[in-house]
């Protein structure tokens, strides 16, 4: 089975490497020093679930050289989804499916708009992993888990084939929820809240959850998303917030989110797709979202400056 990983960062690189380890044909799309290191020494995954180095690794910075693949794992940041969907068009055949690994809830619809809805799957990825240097990804915690499904949540041969592919992959759990959009919003409820509060406090997960004031911020942020989701007719579980907090409490004390790390290091982040999206949806739906609105207002200037610096490079 042929895979391409568009965006070989912490999530895309990890899941792609596990597929390659299992014997699948995987091409990694990267650039700069990261690409050079992968070509020279392979893609190294340092993981609490066992290390792996994909060497030799198929890697390129030009998607047009890859050819048609069966699946694309889209591991770019949320603000890069539209541009990346256009860039991978040459890899899309009649049966190709694109699996988004982003933290927001709009990626699948953006992929469908650019490439055709028949090519978009729904998906979520849970993992704490990041690029620590060229060609080197570190997975520090959270059981690497994918949730996958057709956007209408009906069974399909391509989702079944993807299940079989990941069943052969070490260190990956795959689930197929009865309603993929509920699953996507359930993750959104967790990750937007954890990312936003983590970014404004600049503290690891353990400190945030163990401090009563910041723990309350997390719960308030989750409740806001819960209300927005229900207004959008997303049938979240009545235990969605409690379950999200239980998962949050299970994570490593020193863990941080990718948005939190990006903001701390002055890089463009997923702020617009997380707390920014909650704030905008709240306005559109007439639902108060004071926690996410505060987070967005505090961080938006830094976000815009980071994007200006990135665009000037």
Image (spheres, rainbow, N blue to C red):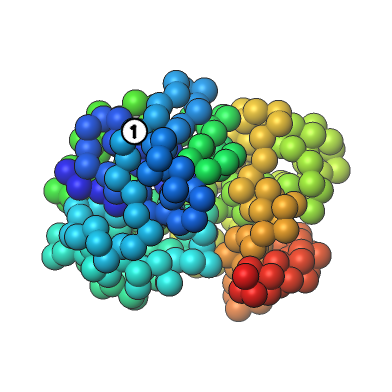
Q: Is residue 249 above or below residue 189?
A: above
- Answer yes or no: is residue 118 visible: yes
Pick the residue in front: 26 or 277: 26
Left or right, 288 with respect to 107, comes to right
**Residue 158 place in picture, x, y as percent:** 18, 50
**Residue 304 place in picture, x, y as percent:** 71, 72
Name which quarter of the figure residue 255 lies in: top right
Instruction: Give SS at disc 1.
Output: loop
Q: Is residue 1 above or below residue 70?
A: above
Residue at x 50%, y 28% (from the top left corner): 46
Name which quarter of the figure residue 141 lies in: top right
Residue at x 62%, y 70% (from the top left corner): 313
Tag count: 1
Q: Is residue 294 above or below residue 155?
A: below
**Residue 9 place in picture, x, y as percent:** 49, 48
Q: Which quadrant, please, contains the N terminus?
A: top left
Left or right, 209 with respect to 99, comes to right
Residue at x 56%, y 37% (from the top left corner): 128
Pick the residue in front: 223 or 78: 78
Farthest residue, direction front? 40
Q: Which residue is mark 1?
A: 55
- Answer yes or no: is residue 117 visible: no
């Amino acid at each position: 089975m042929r895979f391409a990983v568009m965006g070989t960062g912490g999530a895309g690189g990890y899941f792609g490497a596990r597929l390659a380890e299992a014997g699948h044909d995987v091409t990694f799309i990267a650039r700069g020093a990261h690409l050079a290191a992968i070509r020279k020494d392979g893609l190294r995954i340092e993981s609490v679930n066992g290390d792996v180095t994909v060497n030799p690794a198929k890697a390129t910075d030009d998607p047009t050289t890859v050819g048609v693949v069966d699946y694309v794992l889209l591991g770019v940041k949320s603000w890069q989804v539209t541009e990346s969907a256009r860039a991978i068009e040459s890899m899309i055949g009649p049966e190709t499916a694109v699996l988004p690994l982003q933290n927001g809830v709009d990626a699948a619809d953006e992929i469908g708009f650019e490439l055709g809805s028949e090519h978009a799957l729904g998906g979520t990825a849970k993992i704490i992993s990041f690029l620590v240097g060229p060609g080197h990804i570190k997975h520090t915690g959270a059981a690497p888990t994918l949730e996958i499904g057709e956007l209408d949540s009906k069974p399909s041969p391509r989702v079944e084939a993807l299940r079989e592919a990941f069943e052969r992959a070490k260190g990956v759990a795959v689930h197929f929820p009865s309603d993929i959009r509920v699953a996507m919003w359930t993750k959104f409820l967790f990750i937007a809240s954890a990312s936003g509060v983590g970014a404004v406090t600049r503290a690891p997960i353990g400190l945030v959850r163990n401090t009563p004031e910041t723990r309350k911020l997390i719960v308030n942020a989750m409740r806001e998303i819960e209300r927005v989701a229900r207004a959008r007719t997303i049938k979240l579980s009545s235990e969605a917030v409690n379950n999200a907090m239980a998962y949050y409490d299970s994570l490593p004390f020193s863990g941080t989110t990718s948005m939190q790390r990006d903001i701390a290091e002055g890089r463009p982040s997923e702020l617009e797709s997380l707390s920014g999206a909650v704030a905008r949806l709240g306005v559109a739906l007439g639902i108060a979202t004071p926690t996410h609105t505060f987070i967005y207002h505090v961080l938006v200037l830094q976000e815009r400056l980071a994007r200006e610096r990135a665009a000037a490079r």
